[in-house]
Amino acid sequence: MKSRTVLLIVAILSAYVAFSAYIGWNGFAFWRAAVTESADWVYWIAYAWLAYGYLGAMLLRRALPYRLYVGVKLIGSYGLAVLMYSLLTLPFADLAFLLLRLGGVEADTAVRAIGTVVLLLLAVMVAVGSRNAWSPVVRRYDIAVAKRAGGRKELRIAAASDLHLGTIVGKRHIRRLIGQVEALRPDLILLPGDVLDDSIEPFVREKMADVLRSLKAPLGVYASLGNHEYIGGHIDEYVERMKAIGIEVLVDRVVRIGEAFCVAGRKDAAVARFAPGSGGRLAVSELLADADKSLPIVLLDHQPRELGEAAEAGVDLLLSGHTHRGQLMPGHLITRRLFELDWGYMRKGAMHAIVSCGFGTWGPPLRIGSRSELLDIRITFGDG
């Protein structure tokens, strides 16, 4: 199994190097034709930062000074998106170059014209992607649960998955979340995993908890673990720091909110890979074994898997994230094939399933074909 993993990593890295070399060669041709025929080293240093900055920052995180690490990673994160869309664009650009040359256009003229068009397209991509990432929308879902919830007839939930708080998404975006949540005036706030991007260090160093503590609702604020909390480790420290600011992280745990309803949170499926000694996670049926099924049950499960099992176990509302809806199209074509529900709403028997594409971003702080979002979920309760 380990040898297969190593071979897979080597294959992915080899493909990345090959693709980045192809993109770099095209960019260099534009540099020589449109910028200067000297100072080639300037181009290659800038390109190396763009192409390998994110990966290099992650590998050298312990060796680099923190601020340098943040800067290299930020530029490199944009580089990931630029390389991705360059790879999709350049084959057409190369074909256009060939056609122009066959038509008698001088080589440097063709390179300058085509390169300018590609750069403009990439600039538009960055501008639109930034707007989609940093200007979250509120998506409303109205659902009915055919159970009594004590004396409560309605429940309003604000849910935000995948904040990915770290070196790129930070306090400014938390303030956006708080402002939008306060405008909704929810009864309950839920965070279905990946509150952290990976390492807990930026969360602590940048004192993000001081801002996040303003996230409050009358019936409480609850979170579940995502794969990125497990990737970063320090689960116990994270849970304690969240508890200190009034946010309960439900780690395979069920809480009963008065006599009205239950909220449950599962360990993420990544626990088996990144924390194998922690005992794995409970099946949904085990997790809810002692829960009062006559009450409405809301389950936080970061990755939208096992929807059928959740419905059979008596869950009334399943909230997930993880997919980002691909974040950068055409990534949504992949997530659509990987998950039964990769974004939006689905009814599974009596259960309502909602998957958010997330409030934050992973890697590039860009979204193409998706939009950062906060969920406004309004539940009406009634007799079954």
Image (cartoon, rainbow, N blue to C red):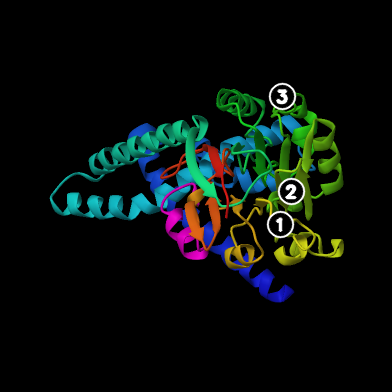
The label shown at residue 229 is: 2
- Number of marks: 3
Nearest the eye: 37 or 13: 13
The residue segment tinted magenta is 326-340
The label shown at residue 300 is: none
Q: Mark 3 points at which residue?
A: 214
Chain-order first, disc 1 or disc 3: 3
Q: Are marks 1 and 3 in contact (CB under 8 Å)?
A: no
Which structural element holds mark 1? loop
| Left or right position of 309 against 339 | right
Q: Position of residue 176 (x, y in %)?
A: 58, 25
**Image point (39%, 48%), residue name:** 26
The quadrant in which the C terminus is found is: bottom right
Front tag of 3 and 2:
3
**Image point (85%, 61%), residue name:** 278
Which structural element holds mark 3? loop
Q: Name the residue under label 1.
A: 268
| Left or right position of 87 against 13 | left
Quarter of the view holding residue 150? top right
Vertically, is 271 above or below 260? below
| Left or right position of 291 against 86 | right
Residue type for callout 1: Asp
Q: Is residue 18 visible?
A: no
Q: Are marks 1 and 2 in contact (CB under 8 Å)?
A: yes
Q: Position of residue 329 (x, y in %)?
A: 42, 50
In the image, residue 39 lies in the stretch drawn in magenta = no
Pointer 2 local density, CA inside 10 Å: few below 14, some 14–19, many at least 20: many
**Image point (76%, 40%), residue name:** 258
User: Please, what is the dominant secondary structure of the magenta stretch?
Assistant: helix
Q: Is residue 264 visible?
A: yes
